[in-house]
Amino acid sequence: MGETLFDKVWAPHVVADLGEDYALLHVDRNMLHDLSGANGLEALEARGLTVHSPDLTFSCPDHAVSSLPGRTATSTPISARLAPALRERAERTGIRHFDVNDPEQGIIHVIGPELGLTLPGLLITCGDSHTSTHGGLGAFAFGVGSSEIAHILATQTIVQKRPDTMRVSFEGALPTGVTPKDMILHLIGLVGTAGGDGFAVEYEGEAVRAMPIEGRLTICNMSIEFGAKIGLIAPDDTTYAYIDGRRFAPKGADWDAALTHWRTLPSAPGARFAREITIDAAKIEPQITWGTSPEHTVGIGGRVPDPASAADANRREAWEKALDYMGLAPGTEMEGVPVDHVFIGSCTNGRLSDLREAAAIATGRKVAEGTTAWVVPGSQAVKRDAETEGLDRVFKEAGFEWREPGCSQCVAANGEVVAPGARAVSTTNRNFVGRQGPGARTHLASPAMAAAAAVTGQITDVRKLGQGG
């Protein structure tokens, strides 16, 4: 029986077998952000410990920083407390730090791949559940808790239980107007937010192989919303072309050796998985969430479900609470629901290709009266490249706000919230109660669908708008 991709990346990282499927694993890259990074370093100092491998740790403020043009590290109260502390401790311990407004600053899960810090087969950790993003390049990546951050800093290792493996195959070609964000939302809506619980999920199939790296990162990003801690996509020629030449990527003979190794990583033809799911990609339509969980997802042609049709009492109660919070009635058509706010950005959909998709819809159109729309690039590099292409002008002329890189309204930790009771279409990863601010009502969608909502003032089937007005 052949090995899976996960088998091949797990084994080389085992420092010690601890029994009962637990192992002590070596960490290749440890990433810190402002909400937890400074605290992790402080905890280490309090115990009189030093950072074991500062050259393998990288830090960047992203969650708490303001996205307002002209912002500084102290533009928000929480950033003023956290960002300088992270910078000072990183500098003191020799950790490479990408400070606020550094040319390489951005959301940690955006800058990792674009700088070449994320490579196939590496084990990557960060105190953030969406660390699974890096699996889009074939990395073994997952989020960790506060005590684990300190352990990794002190030892460059982590204790983990080996998960089972699952393969999700998206077969067939995607229809026009359907994106990787729609694929992962469709999967979560179909199987549920606990569908991947206990698994390392490998995504494959024709639709995945045809996808650029940015789309693969989006799918792996939302593995955590599927219930999985780890999502992976096997590296291929698309992966290698993306990595080649990036700042921290191997060079010269090291590149040749790395490439030889990376080509051995994909799952063997006879590899077996504990669970397999196959989805016909050609039947997916643009997705939109209606409730307060990513599994509350329907195609744009769908309606809000009736709690009376729920499979059990617990689900019925959850649907009733979700509809009450969202201010929607059973049977409501999703297309046509009015929208107050649109947010385009985050580690899920804040990359250059995401902004291009949104700009294609915004071109020649205007943000609807009464609707506020923001575009927050995922990194300084994304912002520069978008401005070079003129995407910022497209958005500004259409009436979108063009802002500085950071997590911003994905989690609203920096105080940038959607108003209570306001309805937002967001390209982020979670639509939990209060996620974008107390009382905010969030509908998850792709960048193109979000742009369509912005220019029409309502949830709209982007396929009806085409490219530009």
Image (cartoon, grey):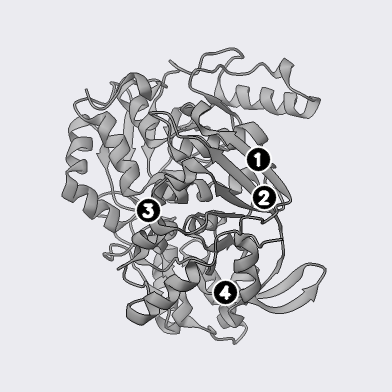
Q: Is residue 24 left or right of residue 240?
A: right
Q: Are marks 3 and 4 in contact (CB under 8 Å)?
A: no
Q: Is residue 325 above or below residue 390?
A: above
What's under tag 2, amino acid-wise? Met
Q: Is residue 341 above or below residue 327?
A: below
Q: Is residue 220 left or right of residue 168?
A: left
Q: Is residue 426 above or below residue 199?
A: above
Numbered mark located on residue 406 in the image = 3
How far apart are the two marked residues, 3 and 1, measured between alpha carbons?
34 Å
Numbered mark located on residue 322 in the image = none
How far apart are the two marked residues, 2 and 4, measured between alpha carbons?
23 Å
> Which of marks 1 and 4 precedes in the sequence?
4
**Residue highlighted by disc 2:** 166
**Residue highlighted by disc 4:** 27
Identify the secondary structure beneath mark 1.
strand
> Which of marks 2 and 3 precedes in the sequence?
2
Corner quadrant of residue 5: bottom right
**Residue highlighted by disc 1:** 277
What's under tag 1, amino acid-wise? Ile
Q: Is residue 307 above or below residue 71?
A: above
What's under tag 4, amino acid-wise? Val
Residue drawn at x 62%, y 43% as measured from the top left: 226
